[in-house]
Image (cartoon, rainbow, N blue to C red):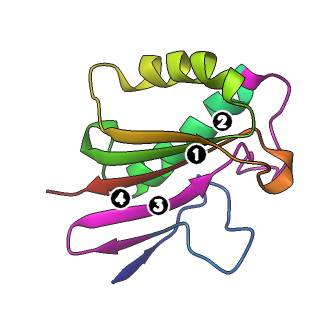
Amino acid sequence: MQKIHTDKAPAAIGPYSQGIAWKGLHFFSGQIALDPNSGDMVQSSLEAEVAQVLDNVEALLKACGLDWHRVLKVSIFLTDMRDFPKVNAWYAERLGDHLPARETVEVSALPKGARVEVSVVAAAD
């Protein structure tokens, strides 16, 4: 088992790793819209927040030599399911024709007042 870390994604804000690799699988912790350089939340708009979240996920993937096409499973957490159509459209733009397994659920709250959190599982082979 190998711990995954990159300075291109936000540092963990609790007792967990950015990700763990094991036997070709990569399990990445949930990403919120923390700017990895400043540590501040990007919340100027829902679109900017989603873009930062997906940028953070991409930074973790790239740190392992992976991209969205290696993602097997995505979990999206929203604090308001009414945001689903917009988030879904921006997600679809980013992933293109790659359609990993996914669930999207509404939660009562997320860390740091985030409206969106995304976690992924990817495979190296």
Work out whether mark 4 precedes mark 1 in sequence or the reverse, and give the earlier one: 1
Q: Which residue is mark 3?
A: 28
Please state which amino acid type lies under the numbered disc 4. Cys
Judged from the image, the secondary structure of the residue bearing numbered disc 3 is strand
Q: Which residue is mark 2?
A: 52
Residue 64 tag number: 4
The front one of 4 and 95 is 95
Judged from the image, the secondary structure of the residue bearing numbered disc 2 is helix
Please state which amino acid type lies under the numbered disc 3. Phe
Q: Position of residue 78 (x, y in %)?
A: 67, 38
In the rendered view of the protein, which quadrant contains the C terminus? bottom left
Of marks 4 and 3, the one in the foreground: 3
Between marks 4 and 1, how big is the CA–CA gap?
13 Å
Q: Which residue is mark 1?
A: 56
**75 shown above or below 89:** below
The front one of 82 and 90 is 82
